[in-house]
Amino acid sequence: MSFESFEEIIHFAIEKEKEAIAFYENASRQDLYSGGRKTFEEFADEERKHQALLEGFLKGEKNLADYDFKWIPDMKRSNYMSDLAYEPGMPYAEALRLAMKREEYSLKLYNDLQEKADDPDVVKLFKMLSQEEAKHKLALETLYDDYMATLGD
């Protein structure tokens, strides 16, 4: 995957955010568990914030220099789970697993792209996108662990 410009990368990332918003919105409508609906609505909102941040970069309203980079730990819980296909009304635990895998793949994509980039601004952009995906992955893995603990796992 190659990009012609910084703007093209941002447009690509915006499309990925839109896909994530659609996934979380759909999952929130399908989840029978009220806590699951709320969880997925909150993740859709987070993805909307990412979209707005990226659009702010395009408009010149936001600057990568203002972004606060932090180390996000990786529990790697999803790394040892098999892929799932989305099914309407799937159980909450499976929906969380699917969401974790989606964030895991997004994190891997942006990390891989970061390693291939030469331009320091592009590296920084992919690093920021990786960090945001890592935050979601960690949050979902924590939710999953907490939920499974209530079931005695």
Image: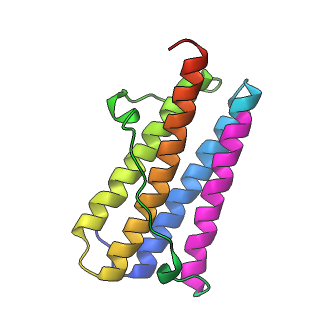
* Residue 135 appears in the figure: yes
Depth check: give the residue in front, 53 or 11. 53
Drawn side of residue 35 relative to residue 17, left or right: right
- Give the magenta-colored segment's residue range: 37-59
At a point 30% along the width and 81% down the height, the residue shown is 120
Residue 126: x percent and y percent?
Answer: 38, 67
At a point 73% along the width and 24% down the height, the residue shown is 32
Depth check: give the residue in front, 109 or 5. 109
Q: Main secondary structure of the magenta part?
A: helix
Q: Is residue 94 magenta?
A: no
Residue 138: x percent and y percent?
Answer: 48, 44
- Residue 44, placed above or below residue 32: below
Q: Is residue 52 magenta?
A: yes
Report the residue that reaches farthest toward the top.
152
Q: Which quadrant of the figure has residue 92? A: top right
Q: How many marks?
A: 0
At a point 44% along the width and 63% down the height, the residue shown is 70
Drawn side of residue 106 relative to residue 135, left or right: left
Colouring of the image: rainbow
Drawn side of residue 17 relative to residue 109, left or right: right
Residue 95: x percent and y percent?
Answer: 56, 29
Quadrant, the N terminus:
bottom left
Residue 107: x percent and y percent?
Answer: 39, 52
